């Protein structure tokens, strides 16, 4: 079994695929490397002497700067390196084109074709509050409505959140856009929009953001205008289940799938196993005419030029530069450090700097050209790889992916997490120990790449797994009954 990996020929470090003992001798590119200290799994060791101030190279790119002289065979981590990133940067467009896998056959999944032509992978009833004041009412309706889950109805779920009132400016716009996006999402066969009546983002205001809608599919209830809002809500949900229950799964080409890509609780193996597997999946789906969305902009810092140079044209390159620099400005406008990353869990798993984290994170994008760049709350319209403006926070970013149109989210992790999102969220482990230890959370294991499974094989297996989920297979969070959402908040609360 392989015990370490040198990711790129230019790298000055290798990564331990299992714990390595001190005084162990390894052969790397025909050269003997004597480890002079223990190297934990997922952590890096030096393949050559690195002088203080020199760049440390991983993934073929700098991941930081040595803060002291580092001897060959030494453990490299936060104690002897730091980020090399600066503030706002200038970029030059240097297009790099790549080829996608050849499409062998048209693949299909069993999904729901909606009356407006859109496609869903679930047939759920969603209860969406316009304001946090009616969260408890929404969850009470959800609990009592479970008796209506039958036939082709997959679930009835409420999505409480704390916003919708006492917000200003962009925060209020974000809330309205995200709620309208979710109301329109084709994974919901029917939606009950539950308002209070006096909130800023009340139902009448929200309808302006929603635009034309199917009155059989979307029902509205203003709690202040109802004598018994829970009972009235239940009656409306009952009507919605009758309407949505008419939909049945039919074969749909995978070219109509939209898949979101996100990572969280990464470790030193995430950029070697799980994230490249998602990248291989993304290339396969795009080769089949489908769409993927990559987000968490702060975790692109340090790897952004790789994405910029894959932009299909200079206009998209310019939008990607704005995507990156706008987020940096957001940090500095709040007097926060741009590079306050990675997290304690990331560091424990072997990630030493934001560049280290970002270069691993962007592996999820595969090799496809960037076809679209989306603002927060903007719905995807262009097939292929899209970049979405959203923060790194797991719940906020995953909700943003769903709001932009993702039917399913692929979430890679080296640490594990039980959270859900408004759409099926596939948890993908970077190491097999996590998969075995938290099998109630993790859906798909990429740790097998360390032993005997090729990237190509895992990419194909993940593709088939996604087709199964799109056809109705529940992920672990769904089986547990979990549904989460979170909206990006930037400013003042009144």
Image (cartoon, rainbow, N blue to C red):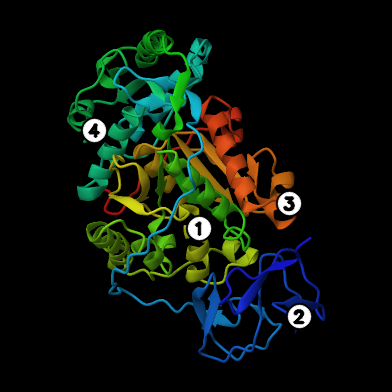
- Considering only order in the chain, which callout, 2 or 3, is on the residue closer to the N terminus? 2
Distance of mark 1 from mark 3, alpha carbons? 22 Å
Residues at marks 4 and 3, CA–CA distance in whole angstroms: 48 Å
Q: Is residue 85 left or right of residue 266?
A: left
Give the quadrant of the N terminus.
bottom right
Label at residue 363: 1
Q: Are marks 1 and 2 in contact (CB under 8 Å)?
A: no
Dot in front, 1 or 3: 1
Name the residue beneath numbered marker 3.
433
- Spatial CA distance of label 4 from label 2 is 61 Å
Q: Quadrant of residue 321?
A: bottom left
Instruction: Report which residue position mark 2 lands on.
Output: 37
Classify mark 3: helix, strand or loop.
helix
**Position of 148 relative to 84 (above/below):** above
| Mark 4, other Cα within 10 Å: few <14 / some 14–19 / many ≥20 | some
Q: Which is in the foreground here, disc 1 or disc 4? A: 1
Label 2 Cα neighbours within 10 Å, binned few <14 / some 14-19 / many ≥20: some
Marks 4 and 2 in Cβ contact (< 8 Å) = no
Q: Which mark sits nearer the N-terminus, 1 or 4?
A: 4
Spatial CA distance of label 1 from label 2 is 29 Å
Res 199 label: 4
Tell me if label 1 and label 3 are in contact, CB under 8 Å.
no
Residue 484, position as x, y percentages in the image: 47, 36
Q: Residues within 10 Å of mark 3 (few under 14, many from 20)?
A: some
At horizontal 43% and vertical 66% (from top left) the residue drawn is 303
**Residue pictured at 47% horizontal, 64% vertical:** 358
| Foreground pick, 487 / 189 | 189
Circle 1: is it few (<14), some (14-19), or many (20+) Cα within 10 Å?
Answer: many
In the image shown, does 335 or 328 lie closer to the viewer?
A: 328
Mark whose residue sits in front, 1 or 2: 1
């Amino acid at each position: 079994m392989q015990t370490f990996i040198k990711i790129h020929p230019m790298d000055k470090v290798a990564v331990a695929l299992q714990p390595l003992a001190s005084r162990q001798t390894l052969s790397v590119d025909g050269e003997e490397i004597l480890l002079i200290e223990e190297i934990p799994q997922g952590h890096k060791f030096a393949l050559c002497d690195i002088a203080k101030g020199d760049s440390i190279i991983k993934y073929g790119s700098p991941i930081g700067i040595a803060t002291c002289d580092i001897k060959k065979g030494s453990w490299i981590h936060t104690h002897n390196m730091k980020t090399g990133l600066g503030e706002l940067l200038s970029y030059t467009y240097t297009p790099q084109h790549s080829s996608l896998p050849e499409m062998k056959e048209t693949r299909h999944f069993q999904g729901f074709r909606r009356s407006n032509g859109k496609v869903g992978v679930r047939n759920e009833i969603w209860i969406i509050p316009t304001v946090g004041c009616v969260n408890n009412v929404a969850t009470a309706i959800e609990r009592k409505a479970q008796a209506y889950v039958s036939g082709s109805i997959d679930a009835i779920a409420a999505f409480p959140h704390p916003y919708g009132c006492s917000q200003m400016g962009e925060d209020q716009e974000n809330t309205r856009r995200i709620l309208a996006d979710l109301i329109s999402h084709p994974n919901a066969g029917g939606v009950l929009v539950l308002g209070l009546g006096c909130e800023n983002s009340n139902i009448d205001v929200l309808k302006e953001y929603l635009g034309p809608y199917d009155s059989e599919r979307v029902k509205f209830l203003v709690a202040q205008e109802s004598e018994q809002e829970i009972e009235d809500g239940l009656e409306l949900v009952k009507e919605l289940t009758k309407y949505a229950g008419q939909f049945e799964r039919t074969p749909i080409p995978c070219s109509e799938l939209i898949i979101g890509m996100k990572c969280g609780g990464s470790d030193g193996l995430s950029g070697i196993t799980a994230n490249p597997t998602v990248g291989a999946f993304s290339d396969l789906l795009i080769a089949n005419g489908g769409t993927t969305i990559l987000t968490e902009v702060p975790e692109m810092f340090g790897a952004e030029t790789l994405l910029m140079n894959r932009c299909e044209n200079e206009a998209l390159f310019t939008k990607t530069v704005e995507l990156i620099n706008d987020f940096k400005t957001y940090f500095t406008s709040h007097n926060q450090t741009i590079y306050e990353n990675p997290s304690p869990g990331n560091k424990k798993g072997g990630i030493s700097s934001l560049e280290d984290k970002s270069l691993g994170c962007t592996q999820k994008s595969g090799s496809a050209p960037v076809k679209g760049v989306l603002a927060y709350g903007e719905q995807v319209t262009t097939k292929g790889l899209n970049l979405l403006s959203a923060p790194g926070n797991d719940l906020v970013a995953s909700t943003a992916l769903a709001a932009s149109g993702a039917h399913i989210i692929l979430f890679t992790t080296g640490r594990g997490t039980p959270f859900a999102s408004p759409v099926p969220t596939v948890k993908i482990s970077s190491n097999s120990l996590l998969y075995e230890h938290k099998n109630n959370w993790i859906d798909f294991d990429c740790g097998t790449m360390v032993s005997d499974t090729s990237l190509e094989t895992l990419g194909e297996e993940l593709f088939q797994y996604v087709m199964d989920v799109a056809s109705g297979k529940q992920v672990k969070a769904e089986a547990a009954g979990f549904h989460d959402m979170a909206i990006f908040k930037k400013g003042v609360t009144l």
